[in-house]
Image (spheres, helix red, strand yellow):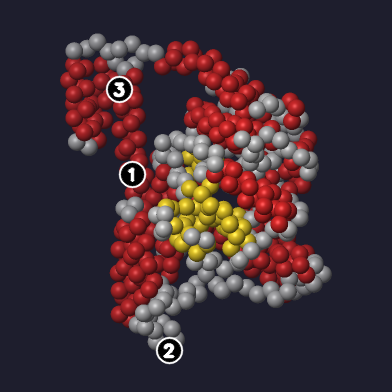
Amino acid sequence: MDIPKAIGPYELRRTIGHGMYGDVFEAYDEEREIRAAVKLFAKAPRGATAFARLRRDALAAGALGHPNIATVIGVGEHEGVPWVATELVTGVSLKQVVRSHAFWPIERVLDVWRQLCEGLAHAHREGLLHLDLKPSDIRVNADGDVKVVDFGAWHVKTLERRRPRTSDEGLHYRPPEVAAGERPDGRADIFAVGAIVYELVTRRKAFPGESPTEVIRSLSRCDPDLASLPSSAFSPGFEQMLARSLDRDPAARPASFEEVHADLVQLVRDAAPRLREADASPAASQPEREGFLEELTRARAEDRLEDALDACRKLLALDPDDEMARRSLSEVESVVLTREADELVGQALAHAADGKLELATRLAEKVERLAPWSPRYLELQVYLDEESARRAADRLVATAQASRAEGRHQEARAALEGALAAMPGHEAATRLLEEFEEGGPSEGPRGLTSDPPASSPPPDRPGASRNEEGEASSSQQTEAEALTAAALRHFTANEHERARDAVTRALALDPRNRRARELQRILRVLG
């Protein structure tokens, strides 16, 4: 599907997500002066019932007015294909958190679980189920606030499903009754949230499998491996709560999110004495303490981090159990590490823009050791994951094309399935696989042709003069290189808007500038 310039009242700015069932764009409504996330489905649903149900559920989600649910602000059709607009939610998705390998303490996971319970309990009370919850549908901002997105799309998706695919990431979080085609209720969402919480803690799928058949078998026959959950001050209650939420029998699960929320509250209350005992420490009594505290406060206010670290160490020399000094030391060290990590992230992304993905990956591994919680590390990891997935999918599409040319249609189909498993929503793989399904395995896809190579130039931009071969003049190339270098400097300094402006100007002069085009792609991925 060609990307439109506008959908309804929204001007599309950039693509922020791809999936089996459509793409998500950052958009802007000039009349209302609001930014939005617009999801355009991949194809029109068969029959009017699915769209009517989508409209009803989307508008119902828009009326919920709960801080943990993204507000739906519009729904409509574009050339017969449905779209839904929601508020533009900042932060990262739980899918990005899991892929970044960043460690989250159990307390933070419990807070995410609590907020999900509050938002989904409100939705269920209003008669609205999600039924397709997965980590990519849950976003967490810098303040720890959680929002659920993509309400109302389940009924469109069910009509589009012909058979489970490896690219259907939601399959791992779908309860057995849904996978079996039975009519679900609110306990299906409870199961999905439990599977997401399990993955946040263990970084493993609760119900693993390399193929849809294996995942469905795991969902219908296996119990999650609770031994993989680390022991904590919340054990064994935490493990027991997860086991109930992930029970294969819906009747054995909690009856509502209110019940799960109440159990979470009690779990924290039961653990509070153990946590207080672990945090208790005697106060330091030395007279020098006040002087060191003043030194620490002044150094932090003036951003003299080395002096602040020295003051913390002096306080801990007086009293190794000084909790305030420990906390300050940890905070200052975190700032130092974050700054070092930001510098390395900038270097890594600059290497990525030059096409040096292996070098960028090595720098990312160093950043992970330094500051795995750094938001910029998460940005870097998201880009590297998507770029690696794109390259793997491109290779598999090329393999499929070669296999088809030699008449090996089954191998071609398998390669295309593999491409979609590597990168759900990959445009060429999706299109070619649909052609397979329309033409049948014996015929192979009709008109199977390769996409333009990644190195091919984008269309000329207005106002840029070209020679007969369509190349920019030497002066334009020189100016474009200077703008690209400036964009990289802005990018390394985390000045994304200035970097975008410089890249746009560079490509207007020289659309074939490889570094500028790669940097443009990075900026699109990172947002």
Q: What amino acid does circle 2 point to?
A: Glu
| Mark whose residue sits in front, 2 or 1 | 2
Q: Is residue 369 above or below residue 462?
A: above
> Label 1's element?
helix
Q: Residue furthest right?
A: 442
- Could you say which is closer to the camera, residue 242 or residue 406? 242
Q: Which residue is mark 1?
A: 340
Q: Residues within 10 Å of mark 1 (few under 14, many from 20)?
A: some
Q: CA distance from mark 2 to mark 3?
A: 69 Å
Q: Residue at x 27, y 25 (%)?
A: 313
Q: Which residue is mark 2?
A: 468
Q: What amino acid does circle 1 point to?
A: Glu
Q: CA distance from mark 3 to mark 1?
A: 22 Å
Whichever of labels 3 and 1 marks the residue nearer the N terminus, that label is 3
**Residue 62 horizontal side relative to residue 430, left or right:** left
Q: Residues within 10 Å of mark 2 (few under 14, many from 20)?
A: few
Q: Which residue is mark 3?
A: 325
Residue 122 picture location, percent across and down: 58, 33
Residue 310 picture location, percent across and down: 24, 28
Q: Residue at x 61, y 58 (%)?
A: 82
Decide: marks 2, 1 in contact (CB < 8 A)? no
Image quarter for residue 401? bottom right
**Residue 234 horizontal side relative to residue 356, left or right:** right
Whichever of labels 2 and 1 marks the residue nearer the N terminus, that label is 1
Q: Residue at x 46, y 57 (%)?
A: 27
Whichever of labels 2 and 3 marks the residue nearer the N terminus, that label is 3
Q: Is residue 192 above or below residue 5?
A: above
> Label 3's element?
helix
Q: Residue at x 41, y 76 (%)?
A: 461
